[in-house]
Structure formats: structure tokens, C-alpha cells
Image (cartoon, rainbow, N blue to C red):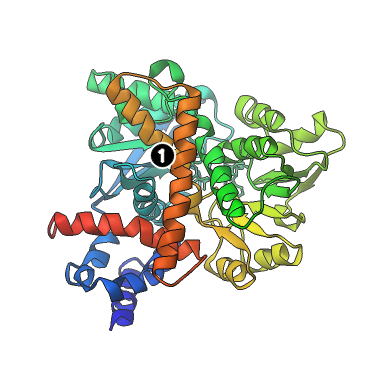
Amino acid sequence: MTMSYVERVYQELVDRNQNESEFQQAAKEVLFSLKPVFEKHPEFIKAGILERIIEPDRMIMFRVPWVDDNGVVKVNRGYRVQFNNSIGPYKGGLRLHPSVNLSIIKFLGFEQILKNSLTGLPIGGGKGGSDFDPKGKSDSEVMRFCQSFMTELCKHIGDDIDVPAGDIGVGAREIGFLFGQYKRIKTMSTAGVLTGKGLNYGGSLARTEATGYGLVYFVDEMLKDRGLSFKDRKVVVSGSGNVAIYAIQKINELGGKVVACSDSSGYVYDEDGIDYSMVQEIKEVKRARIKEYIDAKPNAVYHESKSVWEVPCDIALPCATQNEINKEQAEILVKNGCIAVGEGANMPSTLEAIDVYLENGILFAPAKAANAGGVAVSALEMSQNSMRYSWSFEEVDMKLKSIMQNIYLNSKNAAQEYGFENNLVVGSNIAGFMKVAEAMIAHGVV
Ligand code: NDP
């Protein structure tokens, strides 16, 4: 009977959200792992929690017109999916990438509900973005796009309503332009409306580093639990953006060696260990391609259009994008003796790849637990904004570390409690879900 509840709701989701493969994939992983919860809590079935949690509170889609440097009118599509605010205001990043569509924003928004709950902080789930491609655009073009995007978005967000942040393609530059336009239209400078802000107008120290650091803290906890560590381990990190850069920095600090990182064009291999500050310079300052790394480090090798997962490693940290590791790539990791995978990106492993990890005893840190450090520090940024105060880097970093340790413990304990020892996929889904489900029951059918 319980089986049929989850299966029925999932089938309804598939029927109602046809052609949304990413949303279906994210929901499938979560829904099926929650089966044991419904056996123990029939009140959740009675309250229709699953039927309600998979349907966003609202989805906003809008035209984003802007004019490029040649005077040509361009039109992109903007999205904000406000998924669930049972435990706090909607919170989740904005993604600017040509691949963005409703399915991708819904998968990210859905994941965000449980991830935000796992942080232990009072934030609900949402996500947004646009199919605008910031790559190759001038600063002025990016500014005009951001101003147009915010002109519509500002009607739907606010400190206690919905607080967007960065994601792929949205860093300090974009958040600055978005904030400027919000402030101008609303005639108010209210820092709490966006996170990931610059340090001189309400940003939090350690927010830039938070997702990468948090990922490494989480994986370190998972390793320590087995008497292992990053020390002298060979690590491969995919991507070379915000999450990847600070993951590399923290791994170096812990004595590990990152031998490769990538972008969407290819990967660099550096047997001396990737120098994170060089990647930072190339990607954050020059906004160039990772290929340039070999100009400064002649011993490094660049491989165009090749998968970084062919590089043998002890620990793999996918930090680029969804579905970047499929079954075959997961099998290569196993063959090369990989002992742990930690997801910095959202849903970087396909469902089949996850099966390969679990069947082969690879320690697996799933995204919604392992990359929750970014949103956790975003929530700490909101707290500092409310208090009109700022904590030191060390204070924020210490809180981040303790949040990641708690997420690990809570996920591990939930897995154990429901008979899935060592399965952090099940554990993190259950631990994140329980708090939201209980809040939804308390609020009645809304
Ligand atoms: P950035 O835009 O800073 O960097 C993204 C990196 O991934 C770039 O190196 C980019 O290469 C690469 N990449 C993007 N799309 C693809 C693709 N289709 N194929 C191959 N490589 C690709 O983004 P972030 O570092 O902020 O985000 C990375 C991941 O982490 C995303 O999944 C995001 O949702 C997740 N995440 C981010 C958080 C944050 O705080 N920023 C918080 C939690 C999760 P290129 O330059 O060639 O496009």
C-alpha cells in the first residue's frame, strides 16, 4: 500500500510534467527513498504531503528584453520557481546559462527545499534564472540584462518573501547589478533581498568560499568516520567556477592533491597539484578558459573535449553541472580505485551512476547534503543583514563547519534509523524531508 502511494504520486508527476526530465529525475530519487517514512508515518499520506510538496507554490516566467552593444534587441526568458516556504522564505540561486529551462529550474528548486531544511536554518526552497549566456558578453551587456531581469523579478521577491543568490553564471558582478536595480526600483536599500553581495554593501565574509569549503568539510567528515582523510589523496574536481575553486583550495589545506579540473571545453591535468589561485585568476578575474592554465604551468597538460573522469583519482568531486557523471563514467571511477565521490554541483550524477557507487562501496556524499554550505552561509548573510552586523571570516567559517558536521550526522542517523545504514542518499532525503513535512502538517492543507 505504501509502495503504491509513492509510485502513484511519482506517476502523476510524470504525467503532469512531461518533457521535464531533470525534474522527474530529481523527484524520482527523493520520492522513492522516502518510502520507509510513509510506512512509519501514515499521517503524511493522509495529509497529502507528497502530492503537495512536488507542486511548486508558484512558477513565474517572464520576458527579459535587453539591447546588446550593437543596438540589437535581444529577448531571453526569465524564471523564478517559488517551491515551498513552509519553514522560511523561499531561498535559492539564480542560474544564467543557455541550457536553462523550466525543468532545470524545477529540479533545482525541488532539491533546494530539502537542502535548505538540512542546514537547520529557517529557509524555504526556490530557484530561478534565465537562458541568457553571460559568456562572451561585455560588462555593459550583462548589466543591461540584469537590470531588465530584476525589473520583473523585484515584484516577486523581498527579505521575508524570497531571497535569491548566485549559481552557475551568477557571481559577485551579477549580484551587484541585480541589487542596484532592485534598490533603484523599490527606493530602498534593503540588503536582505539578495545574498552573495559584495562585502561593502552587506555581503558576508566566507560566502564566496562557502560551497567549496562546505563540500570539503562534509566529505572530510564522511572520510573521518571510516578512519580516512584527504591527506595524500589524489583528487579530481570538475568545473573551475565558484564551487570548484574553493574546494581545491580547502583540499590543498587538508593535505590532498587535486590533479585535474575542467570547464565545458576540456580539462587540465597537473601532476604537481592544481594551483587554485591560478584557476581563480583565469576564471574569476580574466573570465577566460581553463586552457590558459598551461601557459603559466608548462608541466600541466590540457585535454580538449575530454571527460575529466578518465583521470585516475582516490576522490572525485563533481563541481560543474547536472548529469556530468553517467553510468560508464562511474564505472571508470570504480575501475580506477576511487573510494569517495562528493557532489559539489547539483545532481551531477545520473541515477544509474549513483547505483554504481552504492553497489561498489564507494563512499557517496549526495549534493543536497554536501553542497548545502553555500545556502547555509547565505542564510547567515541574511542573519547578519537583519542584525546590521558582520561576523569575522573565522566566525562564519566555524559556523559553516559545524553546520556541515551536523548535516553529516543528521543524514547518517536518519539512514540508520530507517534501516539504510551508510546510505546518505536516503539519510539526507529523510532528514531534510521530516522537518518540512511536519511544518506542512502544522499549517493545514495550504
Ligand atoms: P560557476 O558558473 O562559477 O562555474 C561553473 C563551472 O562548471 C564552470 O567551470 C563551467 O565551465 C562548468 N560548467 C557549467 N556548465 C557546464 C556544462 N554543461 N558542461 C561542463 N561544464 C560546465 O558555477 P558554480 O561553481 O557556482 O556552480 C557549479 C555547480 O554547483 C552547479 O551545479 C550549481 O548549481 C552548484 N552549486 C553552486 C552553489 C554556489 O554557491 N555557487 C551552491 C550549491 C550548488 P564553463 O565556464 O565552460 O561554462
Residue 394 as seen in the image, left or right of residue 117: right
Nearest the eye: 414 or 97 = 414
Q: x%, y% of residue 230?
A: 68, 46
Q: x%, y% of residue 271?
A: 83, 43
User: In which quadrant of the rendered view does residue 242 lie?
Assistant: top right
Residue 368 visible to an observer of this rendering? no
Within 10 angstroms of label 1, few (less than 14), some, or many (20 or more) residues? many
- Amino acid marked by disc 1: Ala
Residue, x 58% and y 44% (percent of image)? Answer: 216
Q: x%, y% of residue 377?
A: 42, 35
Q: Quadrant of ligand 1?
A: top right
| Secondary structure state at the residue bearing disc 1 | helix
Residue 197 visible to an observer of this rendering? yes
Residue, x 22% and y 72% (percent of image)? Answer: 45
Residue 399 as seen in the image, left or right of residue 379: right
Mark 1: is the Cβ under 8 angstroms from ligand 1? no
Residue, x 28% and y 73% (percent of image)? Answer: 40
Which residue reaches farthest bottom?
Answer: 1
Q: x%, y% of residue 395?
A: 46, 27
Q: On the image, numbered disc 1 is attached to which residue?
A: 376
Q: What is the quadrant of the N terminus in the image?
A: bottom left
Which residue reaches farthest front?
Answer: 227
Q: What is the quadrant of the C terminus in the image?
A: bottom left
